[in-house]
Amino acid sequence: MKTRKGNNSENAFSLEKNNELITNDSEMIAHAKIQPLGGELKMCYFSVIIPCYNVSKYLRRCLDSVVNQTFPNIEIILIDDKSTDDSLSIIYEYKHKDERIRVIALDKNYGVARARNSGMKIASGKYASFIDPDDYLDIDFYEKLYLKSIENDADIVKGAAFGVKDIASYIPINKYFFYAQWWSAVYKLELLRKYHILFPEDVFCGQDFVFQRHACIKAKDIVLVNDTHYHYCKRKVRQPRIALYIIIFSSINPIKASLLIGLIYLILDLLPFINLNETPVLSTLITF
């Protein structure tokens, strides 16, 4: 594969397209290939966004679960956040085998928020899905979420979570029960772009919580699929959830304000259902 390296200009990332590595400025929106499905050409339905940083030990398991999905009409966007191990080599190994894979190689280690946002920028599917590279999916995950999504055109479609206590049984009571396990859902890209819902890059931790709260507030509905799973693997280092404190003690911007508003609505909506002597939901908000 011929490549040409980017220079030291203001380019934020490099994008691989048509087996050639090309540099692009941060405003460039790439067009995804049209993927074959059932002998016909159709646009991809799910944009699967996977940020990667030094995850060579786990990455193949994750990618195998994605490329072998029973629903093939997906694009797979792999963002390497300047890994120092073999992650990028593994990414290209899979890229050569599967034309649905698109690669973004960040020019330095920006962090997971920038990586996911870069993936969203070039995503062309109807829904965005986010997978951590040390996790994996049931082989029919996207097929079953697709079938549910076409029933009612929901803004968010959530699969079941394996490896943690699932919260799905509470969500039909009120959508604000969708306070965790954001990675087990897919999000309509039209919704994310309409309301500029991104992962805040200026927040030390809890970026995913900000994203989820903002999406939950704006979504008109969240529907559930209980018979297929996102497998959450507990390799991750657990950090205290300090996003709320960052919001309270820093200048409020629209994303941070939406999180705070979401938390207020969540508490108000949940109070009728919570035994104040046993508040695992509220404690989970701080520690999950």
Image (tube, rainbow, N blue to C red):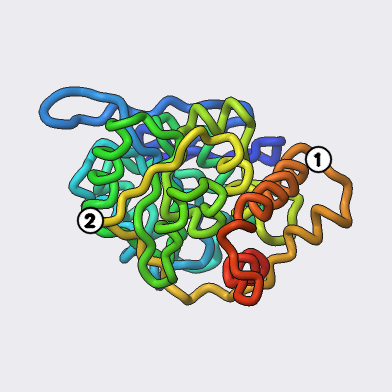
* Label 1 element class: loop
**Residue 64 seen by the camera:** no
Which of the image's four quarters has the C terminus?
A: bottom right
Q: Name the residue under label 1.
A: 253
Q: Which amino acid does label 2 sit on?
A: Ile
* Label 2 element class: loop
Report the disc number at residue 139.
2
For residue 10, what is the image quadrant?
top right
**Residue 166 seen by the camera:** yes
As measured in the structure, the alpha-carbon distance from the residue carrying label 1 to the one carrying label 2 is: 40 Å
Disc on the earlier residue, 1 or 2: 2
Residue at 66%, 59% in the rendered image: 206
Label count reads 2
Residue at 55%, 66% in the rendered image: 84
Q: Which amino acid does label 1 sit on?
A: Asn
Label 2 environment density (alpha carbons within 10 Å; few <14, some 14–19, many ≥20) = some
Left or right: residue 35 versus residue 117 is left
For residue 160, what is the image quadrant?
bottom left
**Where's residue 132, x and y in %?**
46, 59
